Amino acid sequence: MDNADVIDRFYTFCKGVWASFLNLVSGYADATHKAEFDYDFGVAFMLAVIILFFVGSACWAASIATSRRYMAIPHFLLGLVLPWIYPLVILFALDIKGHKQMIRAAEQEKQEKERAEAERQRNIAINTEGQAEQEVVDDNGFNQARFTAIIRNSDSEPGPWKVVFSGNEMIVTKVLEALPELVSVEVKGDEGKTFTMRIPYAKMESWDNA
């Protein structure tokens, strides 16, 4: 049931109440006339004021309820039982029906968007960092192609080589394998023994004939 149907039904209900009130007054007037009672305008006025006092409270309560997407009849009856107190209470205390759920849903949607944006920014930062590292590899001249060529031309470039990486200097006797991010080499130790080591291209500072 939409708001238009609720308002239409409430309007019809109020018309019925008013018609019943007029019929009551008319019937009372006819009865007093037939019984030849004296018509007391003061009593009739007070009766009308009392009825309007309760009906006005009920109609105001129902009007507040319908404007905030609630059924009119329960609030109309409560407005009769608690005249003017109930309408004043719901005027300030009654929220729009579904308003809190709408706010909660909007907050959840905002949080999801913020999380998605944070994840997107994190991915961008990771990709940017990876690209920067790759640029460093490319800029220092040490890469897979260079060491693949050294392996291929091992007869003309037999080594050994003096290599400096991360501030450390050592003697490389043989290039074993060139990988995309690092090179596997055979290194000469202090006692003349050799061992295998993997050196990242990004950490290389120099590579010269020994």
Image (cartoon, rainbow, N blue to C red):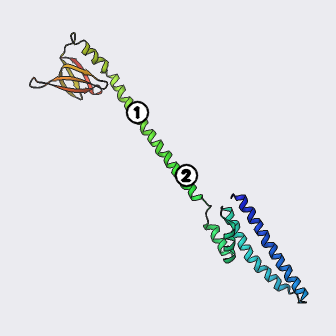
Total numbered labels placed on residues in the image: 2
Tell me the kind of residue under disc 1: Asn
Q: Is residue 111 left or right of residue 7?
A: left
Which mark, by number, is residue 127? 1
Tell me the kind of residue under disc 2: Ala
- 160 versus 4 height, above or below: above
| Residue 177 in picture, x, y percent from top left | 25, 21
Q: Residue furthest top?
A: 156
| Residue 165 in picture, x, y percent from top left | 24, 26
| Residue 203 in picture, x, y percent from top left | 27, 28
* Mark 2: secondary structure: helix
Q: Nearer the viewer, residue 85 or 177?
A: 177
Q: Nearer the viewer, residue 172 or 54?
A: 54
Q: Residue furthest front?
A: 1
Based on the displayed image, in which of its 4 quarters is residue 189 positioned? top left
Based on the displayed image, in which of its 4 quarters is residue 159 positioned? top left
Residue at point 28%, 14% (across, down): 149
Residue at point 23%, 24% (across, down): 184
Q: Nearer the viewer, residue 13 or 136?
A: 13
Mark 1 nearby-residue class (10 Å; few <14, some 14–19, many ≥20): few
Residue at point 35%, 29% (across, down): 133
* Mark 1: secondary structure: helix
| Mark 2 to mark 1 CA distance (whole Å) | 31 Å
Q: Is residue 15 left or right of residue 171?
A: right
Q: Is residue 179 left or right of residue 57?
A: left
- Could you tell me which quadrant the C terminus lies in? top left
Residue at point 31%, 22% (across, down): 140
Which mark, by number, is residue 56? none
- 151 versus 8 height, above or below: above
- Could you tell me which quadrant the N terminus lies in? bottom right
| Residue 208 in picture, x, y percent from top left | 22, 17
Which mark, by number, is residue 106? 2
